[in-house]
Amino acid sequence: MLQTAIAIASNCQPVAARCVKPLSKPLSRGREESEKRSTEELSVLHPESVLKSSDAIGWHNVRAIHFRHTAKEVTIPASDDHCMALNLGAPFFTNVYPGKRRFEGHVRSGEVAIIPAGSSWTCRSEGPELPVMLLLYLRPLFVRSAARELNFWDTEVDLTPQIGFKDKHICHVAMSLLHELNEANVVGRLYSDSLAAGLAIQLVRRYSSLKDIHVGHGGMAPHKLRRAIALIDHHLSDEEEGRVALRAVATNVHMSYFHFSRAFKQSMGMTATNYIAERRIERAKKMLEETEMPISEIALRSGFSSQSHFTTAFRRLAGATPKAFRSAL
């Protein structure tokens, strides 16, 4: 289950924003206009709010915007790039819209929000002071390059909105980039590009779909584990029904089925069968949130042979029946 965004873990672990009921009503006029002009530059839409931008000084791997609200509520259009927003001042409340879902949460001073590419979002001031933010944009292709540096070759890097958490590494890099933004020289441009690489790696390691992939003692070799997970996820993403052919996956990574099963559990902390069940339930949750599809059809699309089997597995892993889960949205 996703947690409410304002619950900040003491060890600075990523905190998923609270996902609320999928949008079923027409967009408000403001959001509708924002969606239509989502490709326009932020500096064009809110020129009075942009204190400084890296656009004029030729940074390559990261785009930085020092942004100060000039209104109680501001809509920031969707971008083709991933965005990290560091709050430098007054707290604000934000809604993030990745597709038909909506995530919400509070962002206090010194806290970070991660907004995946393609998501529009709004910021609403929570007091008399208007918020000030540093917005850092990274291209998805650049983030995937960072994933390859970590030997993640065959798996997509997916991000979920994360709202209102502290990360010392991101804050340190962000403040360094803000300093270089104010210096605006050639050395700063080179330094900013190297800092961007560190940000991208942090995104992959701590806040992406790859964060849980690790190799324990005696487990599977990293490249084999990544290949196996990519094959399993590809099978699931294609809405293929029935059992995932784990013996074929084992053969593909040049392991016997016995050694594959044991090594996968040592590396992931769960059996391959349990991993598949969890991914299917996560897929089912998205369909319950984002569609009006009958539960029986969701069961089949999630790879379950019957609705009763799906309900049993869903209750075991999600703590509620599919019907109760949907009703609570």
Image (cartoon, helix red, strand yellow):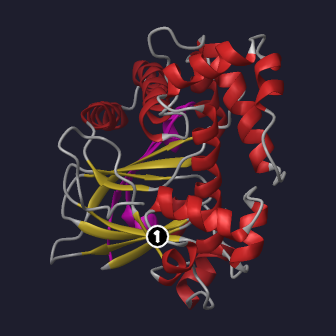
Residue 66 versus residue 45 in the image, above or below: above
Q: Which residue is drawn at 27% across and 59% down?
A: 132
Q: Nearer the viewer, residue 236 or 24?
A: 236
Residue 217 in percent (x, y) is at 44, 10
Q: Would residue 113 appear left or right of 171 to someone viewing this image?
A: right
Magenta stretch in the rendered image: 46-71
Residue 306 versus residue 113 in the image, above or below: below
Q: Would residue 142 appear left or right of 134 to someone viewing this image?
A: right
Residue 56 versus residue 308 in the image, above or below: above
Q: Nearer the viewer, residue 195 or 203?
A: 203
Quarter of the picture containing the N terminus is: bottom left
Q: Would residue 87 appear left or right of 210 to someone viewing this image?
A: left
Q: Residue at x 79, y 44 (%)?
A: 243
Kind of residue at disc 1: Ala
The kind of secondary structure element at disc 1 is loop
Q: Is residue 81 visible?
A: no
The residue labelled by disc 1 is 320
Q: Residue at x 49, y 58 (%)?
A: 316
Q: Is 51 part of what is drawn in magenta? A: yes
Residue 66 in percent (x, y) is at 36, 51
Occupied quadrant, residue 158:
top right
Q: Which of 68 and 127 is in front in this view?
A: 127
Q: Can residue 114 be seen in this view?
A: yes
Residue 322 in percent (x, y) is at 57, 73
